[in-house]
Image (cartoon, rainbow, N blue to C red):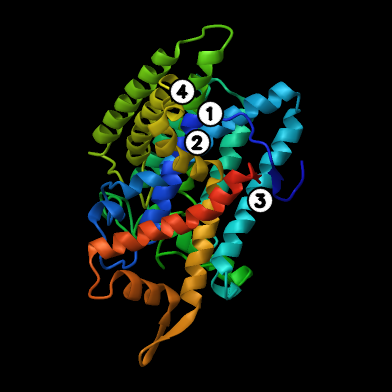
Amino acid sequence: MQGTPSITTTAPTRVLSIDVLRGITIAFMILVNDPGDWGHTYAQLDHAKWNGCTLTDLVFPTFLFLVGASIILSLRSRLARGDSHRVIALHILRRSAILFAIDLFLAAFPHFHLTHLRIYGVITRIALCYLCAGLICLTTQRARTLLAICAALLVGYWALMRLVPVPGFGIPTHDIPLLDPDRNLTAWLDRTVMAFLQRTIHTGRLYEHTRDPEGLLSTLPAIATTLLGSVAALWLRRTSAKAHAITQSRCAVGLFLWGLLSLAAGAVWNHGFPINKNLWTSSYVLFVAGCALIGLAACYWLIDIRRFHETRPGRWLTWPWLVFGSNAIVAYIVSELLVEIMIWIKVPDGEKTVTAWLWVYHHLFAHNQSTNVTSVAFALAFVVVCFLPNWLLWRKRIFVKI
């Protein structure tokens, strides 16, 4: 394995239903991240302000869930090829390091003012979750063991957030409200870490100044999200197992029923530990995992059982998501680079100078006035633009692997 991104011109064996769901997820991620006007967005296309959950709040954890599923499928094929545990572990470490480096580059681009570099980030969280879940799954692929680890992470995180006094503020529910936006253990730890980094390496900042939605402590339940995806993939593998095999129909029904159970568990836990994407609460993990399981069950039934993608309408309806899903990280990186470039470029607009982003939005989409409709139209157009590089890679049968 090489330490730099490699490219293969032939597609590896893939589970198309996972690719389709991943493609839908990454397209929706770009859509909700890049409206034309943040002052005009539909409620479901924005994150919940604090507690609660919108469609947008389902996107990132679903992607991590699919990362976990892909880990199991990748390990299966690599172990079957005869790769040693040591070689695979080193590859997991290298891949995580490359993802982290990519996120640092995107955080610094295009000005590279390193004194205010955001260490945390979406791809950093993917790197950490992939690293931990990958090494855990390399050690054991027993579903019960992985579920026990998930339970320990979720209950442990609840205990930390509910029972541990927050330095300078007191005990949650006694001295301060549970999950207070700034006076919670996660936010305190992130501020402490950033203060330490500023003193030692003179860089580091938090996305929301006093807290960060991709903070350090909340990565623990995010790892559980990833491992739940791995458990789902172990269930998918049973359709081709030599012993104790299950039918594809039973597999789809199982995913759906486990999804309902997880949704219900998250909704019940919400009463004592609110669903909160910013803090990635344990109830949020279960609730979103339920949604991801139901989504995977639907895709599995349509693609792997009904073979919908082989029908004439099915080819057209699933093709865009397969294109997005086959090079999902590429699509996300392209979207981040385009945003930064369009904000960096300044163009004259009458008597003032504005960013290229605002110029395009106001002149092509919101010439009369900015509305929710014009804002979404811009976001949809941006998704199409980000689709084009993936389409070119798809046409050449190039799948970028880190």
Residue at the image position 53 percent from the left and 19 percent from the top: 237
Question: What x and y, as percent, mark residue 72?
Answer: 57, 28
Query: In this rendering, which labeled residue sits more in front, label 3 or label 4?
Result: 4
Q: Which residue is mark 3?
A: 97
Q: Is residue 188 above or below residue 324?
A: below
Residue 120 visible: no
Dot placed on the residue nearer the N-terminal end, 3 or 1: 1
Instruction: Estimate how packed mark 2 is, as few (under 14), some (14 to 19) or many (20 or more) residues with alpha carbons within 10 Å.
Output: many
> Dots 1 and 4: beta carbons under 8 Å?
yes
Question: What x and y, as percent, mark residue 242?
Answer: 59, 8
Q: Residue furthest bottom?
A: 351
The label shown at residue 19 is 2
Could you tell me the amino acid type at mark 3?
Answer: Ala
Q: Nearer the viewer, residue 153 or 375?
A: 375
Dot placed on the residue nearer the N-terminal end, 2 or 4: 2
> Dots 2 and 4: beta carbons under 8 Å?
no
Q: Is residue 203 above or below residue 286?
A: below
Distance between the Cα atoms at labels 2 and 3?
A: 24 Å
Q: Residue furthest top?
A: 243
Residue at the image position 73 percent from the left and 24 percent from the top: 81
Q: Which residue is mark 4?
A: 304
The label shown at residue 15 is 1
Question: What x and y, as percent, mark residue 279?
Answer: 37, 50
**Label 3 element class:** helix
**Label 1 element class:** loop
The image quarter containing residue 301 is: top left
Could you tell me the amino acid type at mark 2?
Answer: Asp
Dot placed on the residue nearer the N-terminal end, 3 or 4: 3
Instruction: Estimate how packed mark 1 is, as few (under 14), some (14 to 19) or many (20 or more) residues with alpha carbons within 10 Å.
Output: some
